[in-house]
């Protein structure tokens, strides 16, 4: 079956521009996570969604970052007024059961801010 | 102190060697523990969950020590294909924030 998909796979933008990153989770997965991975670094938790509950935004690094999940499925991560330090790979993961089960990751979006 | 800490390595070992990674976590209320594997420029994939009683999957053994707040991963009879970064993952209770360690790089050489 289809896995988690993300688009675009690569995004190059100029400092100060807004970008939108999309994640299509595995069908039926109720939990969705966004992470950021900078070069040579581990994954930094950004935000998660579980069903219709309010998202946990505790990992968002600044108010320039926001995310939404429409209809409990597709999610969009928006970064406003991008900065060079936002350059990273943004990974999305989904999970069928929130508490303990495996997270399935998408291939990521590589964002480069010039 | 980071919430999840790992030795970044790299560990360079010959084929057939046994290698062990440790990971420490700071939140004593953490409930779930995992090891993920990440190949170069690829997404992470679950290697195995870590259970309180310890668990084994083929050449891989994971152990949890709650008192000392560390988990370990043992790889026996290393293969070239084991070369990757191994990520320690901890999930708390109450909230569902998942914390990934920075990873330990392993290179297995012929």
Image (cartoon, helix red, strand yellow):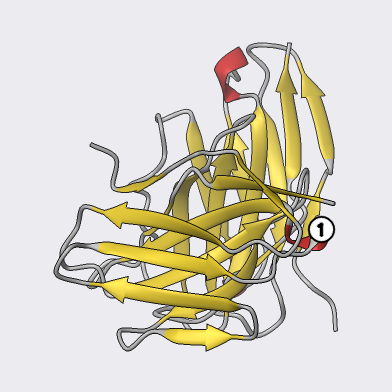
Q: Position of residue B89 (x, y in %)?
A: 44, 61
Q: Nearer the viewer, residue B94 or A62?
A: B94
Residue at the location (14% across, 69% down)? B67
Number of labelled discs?
A: 1
Q: Nearer the viewer, residue B5 or A38?
A: B5
Residue A52 appearing in the image: no
Q: Is residue B25 left or right of residue B49?
A: left
Q: Nearer the viewer, residue A25 or A108?
A: A108
Residue at the location (56% across, 18% down)? A85
In this view, B25 is above or below B64: above
Q: Quadrant of residue A16?
A: top right
Q: Quadrant of residue A23?
A: bottom right
Residue at the location (45% across, 48% down)? A45
Residue A64 appearing in the image: yes
Q: Residues within 10 Å of mark 1 (few under 14, many from 20)?
A: some
Q: Which quadrant holds the N terminus of chain B?
A: top left
Q: Position of residue A69 (x, y in %)?
A: 57, 61
**Of helix, strand and loop, which one carries label 1?**
helix
In this view, B23 is above or below A18: below
Q: Quadrant of residue B50?
A: bottom left
Q: Position of residue A15 (x, y in %)?
A: 66, 11
Q: Is residue A45 left or right of residue B23?
A: right
Q: Which residue is mark 1?
A: B80
Host chain of mark 1: B
Q: Position of residue A39 (x, y in %)?
A: 64, 29
In this view, B74 is above or below B9: below
Q: Is residue B9 left or right of residue B27?
A: right
Q: Nearer the viewer, residue A108 or B106?
A: B106
């Amino acid at each position: 079956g289809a896995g988690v998909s993300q688009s675009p796979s690569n995004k190059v933008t100029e400092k100060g521009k807004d970008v939108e990153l999309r994640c299509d989770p595995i069908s039926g997965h109720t939990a969705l996570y966004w992470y950021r991975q900078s070069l040579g670094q581990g994954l930094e938790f950004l935000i998660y969604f579980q069903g219709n509950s309010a998202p946990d935004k505790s990992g968002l690094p600044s108010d320039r970052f926001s995310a939404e999940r429409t209809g409990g499925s597709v999610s969009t991560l928006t970064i406003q007024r991008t900065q060079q330090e936002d350059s990273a790979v943004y990974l999305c993961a989904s999970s069928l059961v929130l508490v303990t089960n495996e997270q399935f990751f998408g291939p990521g979006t590589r964002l480069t801010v010039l | 102190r980071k919430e999840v800490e790992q030795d970044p390595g790299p560990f360079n070992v010959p084929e057939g060697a046994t290698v062990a990674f440790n990971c420490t976590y700071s939140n004593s209320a953490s409930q779930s523990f995992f090891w993920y594997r990440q190949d170069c420029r690829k997404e992470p994939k679950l290697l195995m969950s870590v259970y309180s009683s310890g668990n084994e999957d083929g050449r891989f053994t994971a152990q949890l020590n709650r008192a000392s707040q560390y988990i370990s991963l043992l790889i026996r009879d290393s293969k070239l294909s084991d070369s990757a970064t191994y990520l320690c993952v901890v999930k708390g209770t109450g909230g569902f924030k998942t914390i990934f360690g920075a990873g330990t790089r392993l290179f297995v050489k012929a």
